[in-house]
Image (spheres, grey):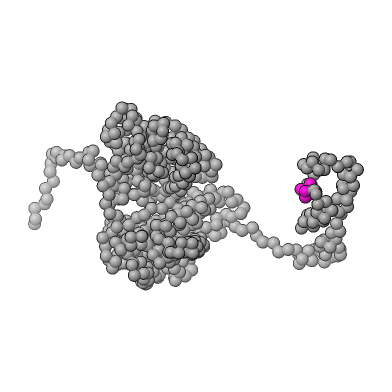
Amino acid sequence: MALRGDWMYENNGGTCVAIAGIDYCVVAADTRLSVGYNILTRDHSKICSLADKVVLASSGFQGDIRALHKNLAARHLLYQHQHNKQMSCPAMGQLLSNTLYYKRFFPYYAFNVLGGLDNEGKGCVFTYDAVGSYERVGYSTQGSGSSLIMPVLDNQLKSPSPLLLPARDAVTPLSETEAVDLVKDVFASATERDIYTGDKLEIVVINASGIKREYLELRKD
Amino acid sequence: MLLLVFGLSFLSFFPSLSLSQHFAPTRTKPHHRISVSLNLKQRKQREEKRRMMMKLDTSGLESFSAAVPSAMAAAEDQLFAPPSFDLPAGCADFDKFQMEAKQTLKHAKGTTTLAFIFNQGVIVAADSRASMGGYISSQSVKKIIEINPYMLGTMAGGAADCQFWHRNLGIKCRLHELANKRRISVTGASKLLANILYSYRGMGLSIGTMIAGWDEKGPGLYYVDSEGGRLKGNRFSVGSGSPYAYGVLDNGYRPDMTVEEAHELARRAIYHATFRDGASGGVVSVYHVGPNGWKKLSGDDVSELHYKYYPVQPTPVEHEMVDAPPA
């Protein structure tokens, strides 16, 4: 990929998943970093804790992802100085969308899922494309294994569309432990069939008592 | 660096004159009235002084090898030459790279949206599918964007482009209200958007939108796209499913429909487009814009609509298959 003189991106692979619950949010990503057929490291985190109720997971080109995470963390610090409070998840969602769109003509090669709790304490997941179009959803996945994982999540978690009238709730009725188990199962399956997913799974759970991190070993082949 | 030195020295001699005259490489007409009033002799004297100051001794800046011609000159040139770097990858043809980068990311497009004016106002309808290449990235995208309580915009083309610029349009409309103490017209709002998109023409934005609203002149509908086009009209459909939607819409349209009839026509048109177009699907949303603003009339899943319009008929069978008797 890097051999072509005019191509400035690289895909480092990886998959991210986020599930929103009634009062929790689960964000998970594998920790493999690859270039082509090589694995550069088995221990690279794709998850960035932006605020005490907001966590961002991104897959794609790690150079752009690093820069994007740094940019958002700096903007969050400015916000805290100006407003004397942490950013809420919907606010960070809009900020990420605008940050991505400002580089519309030389995009961040980053596929993001933002997870956290909204102002009412309910789980909230935002899913993005590379140039900033975003949507609040009940669950989402991005990255190389996303087309393997999304159908499974649709099967287990699909809820009525928020566009229906009369409206119906979009949040999953799973409990926190059930959601974490589902994430582990789904990554184990994706690891079987996607070469860029594997090694280790990092699971971050956000609820009213804070942010909790957990690791699960995946297949290393 | 040399010019800066010039500037400082001239300031001390001719404080009343601007610097720009003396830096001009060509002898153009003087811009300032001060110099016109000087007589020819004074002007000639200043010219002389300037030309003398131009002759600086730059021998110290020449490279060592030129001053000392020797067989070693070539090697020394390399030693003392400033380090050269390869241009970063991608600089050879940045425009082509930008175009390719935009193609590769394949952001969401493919949709069906429609809007039409009738005697009771404007009906706006859209599906809710977003696709990235062949992958359905979402079945619940909001394609009808509420710019303000009496104006709607539809989204077709690049999702991020539409979202961002519609939000930007909403901000501009609000600023217009605050600055002019009255609501912006549909004509004005669509013109604002069209002018912005025209300035980005050719850069790869992909937006095909309709601005629908009710202002002092009554119902208004404009089609605006990223090529810079802006059309006023009574009936529009935009997106990959628009041919199918036009078929149903043009067939059933009458200006004197009731709101209910218009609602049903719009819903059917989008349903038929989602039936035949792979890039459209999800939920049909229908809005009505009346004199008091917009109101969402319905949101129906297209697969449920299918069974509502075409209920399953029990098909008569001639020979019915019978399970094999247990052995």
Residue A102 in the image: x percent, y percent?
51, 52
Residue B138 in the image: x percent, y percent?
36, 51
Query: Does residue B165 appear in this view?
Result: no
Instruction: Judge by depth and name the residue closer to the eye, A22 or A216.
Output: A22
Residue lying at 36% horizontally and 54% vertically, measured from the top left: A136
Q: Main secondary structure of the magenta part?
A: helix
* Picture quadrant of residue B148: top left
Q: Examine the structure image and report whether residue B51 is included in the region drawn in magenta.
A: no
Residue B202 in the image: x percent, y percent?
54, 42
Instruction: Judge by depth and name the residue closer to the eye, A130 or B187.
Output: B187
Q: Is residue B23 left or right of residue A70?
A: right
Residue lying at 88% horizontally and 41% vertically, measured from the top left: B39
> How many marks on residues?
0
Query: Does residue B297 appear in this view?
Result: yes
Residue lying at 80% horizontally and 44% vertically, measured from the top left: B26
Q: Quadrant of the C terminus of chain A?
A: bottom left
Q: Is residue A215 left or right of residue B28?
A: left
Residue B80 in the image: x percent, y percent?
77, 66
Question: What residue span does the magenta drawing correspond to?
Answer: B18-22
Q: Does residue A7 lie above or below A77 as drawn?
A: above
Residue lying at the far front of the rendered structure: B181
Instruction: Judge by depth and name the residue closer to the eye, A61 or A125.
Output: A125
Residue lying at 71% horizontally and 64% vertically, measured from the top left: B83
Instruction: Judge by depth and name the residue closer to the eye, B27 or A56.
Output: B27
